[in-house]
């Protein structure tokens, strides 16, 4: 959903300040600007969520600047969860490369659409909707996801709400979640940055 390009390409010059939309064009360019090897590197999923994401977006692969798309490599330990999040600037399409993954998204009416899918199967998440994935297989799992934005952005709900700097006041979170300070403080302690 990015704007249409006005020339063949505009490899991003990440050292220049971002312009109104994206980065200024770098010059000269070479073949290497249009290739990226970062989606096949094995990721370390030993973390609390059991998931790791390697993005190929304009910041890691500047050749994508103005081209309106990007991709991620997402790896899961057994039981790993990519927590609920949303991409404000892109629809997401993904394909399972390995394993069995429970994939779901929520409509703005709070309906959950979900399915367990396996290697070779694809899913889509409409732009901006909250979604998650959970590795329900016995072994590891891996997805390749793609986005119709060079920088889709990701609002990860748990860390946005409980790990922000500065913090969201407890008065807001206790009322929002119909709970008490102790519960909110406990959650904040898990997401503190
Ligand atoms: C998965 O949801 C991803 O954003 O790569
Ligand atoms: Mn996503």
Image: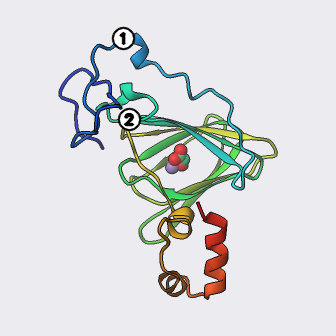
Residue at image x 22%, y 35%?
4
Tell me if the residue at label 1 has its CB under 8 Å from ligand 1.
no
Q: Is residue 136 left or right of residue 34?
A: right
Above or below, 58 relative to 171: above
Front residue of 136 and 87: 87
Residue 181 shows up from this direction: yes
Q: Position of residue 177 (x, y in %)?
A: 55, 82
- Report, in whole angstroms, how far the alpha carbon at label 2 lies from the one at label 1: 20 Å
Q: Which mark is residue 69?
A: 2
Q: Residue at x 75, y 46 (%)?
A: 46
Res 39 quadrant in image = top right
Give residue 105's position: percent from left, percent from top: 52, 58
Q: Given this view, does label 2 or label 1 mark the residue nearer the observer? A: 1
Q: Could you say where residue 72 lies in the image, as x and y percent from the top left? A: 53, 37
The mark found on residue 10 in the picture is none
Tell me the crowding category of disc 2: few under 14, some 14 to 19, or many 20 or more residues within 10 angstroms, Cα based.
Answer: many
N-term-proximal mark, 2 vs 1 = 1
Say which residue label 1 marks.
30
* Residue drawn at x 51%, y 87% as measured from the top left: 175
């Amino acid at each position: 959903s990015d704007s249409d390009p006005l020339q063949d390409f505009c490899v991003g010059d990440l050292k220049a300040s971002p312009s109104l939309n994206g980065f200024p064009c770098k010059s000269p360019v070479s073949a290497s600007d249009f290739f990226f090897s970062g989606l096949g590197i094995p990721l370390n999923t030993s973390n609390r969520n059991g998931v790791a994401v390697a993005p190929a977006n304009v910041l890691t692969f500047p050749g994508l600047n103005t081209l309106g798309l990007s991709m991620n490599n997402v790896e899961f330990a057994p039981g790993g969860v990519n927590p609920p999040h949303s991409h404000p600037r892109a629809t997401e399409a993904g394909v399972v490369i390995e394993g069995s993954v429970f994939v779901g998204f929520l409509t703005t009416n709070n309906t959950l659409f979900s399915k367990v899918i396996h290697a070779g199967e694809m899913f889509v998440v409409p732009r901006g909707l909250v979604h998650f994935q959970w590795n329900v297989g016995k072994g590891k799992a891996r997805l390749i996801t793609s986005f119709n934005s060079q920088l889709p952005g990701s609002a990860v709900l748990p860390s946005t709400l409980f790990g922000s700097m500065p913090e969201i006041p407890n008065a807001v979170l206790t009322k929002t979640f119909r709970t008490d300070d102790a519960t909110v403080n406990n959650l904040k302690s898990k997401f503190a940055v």
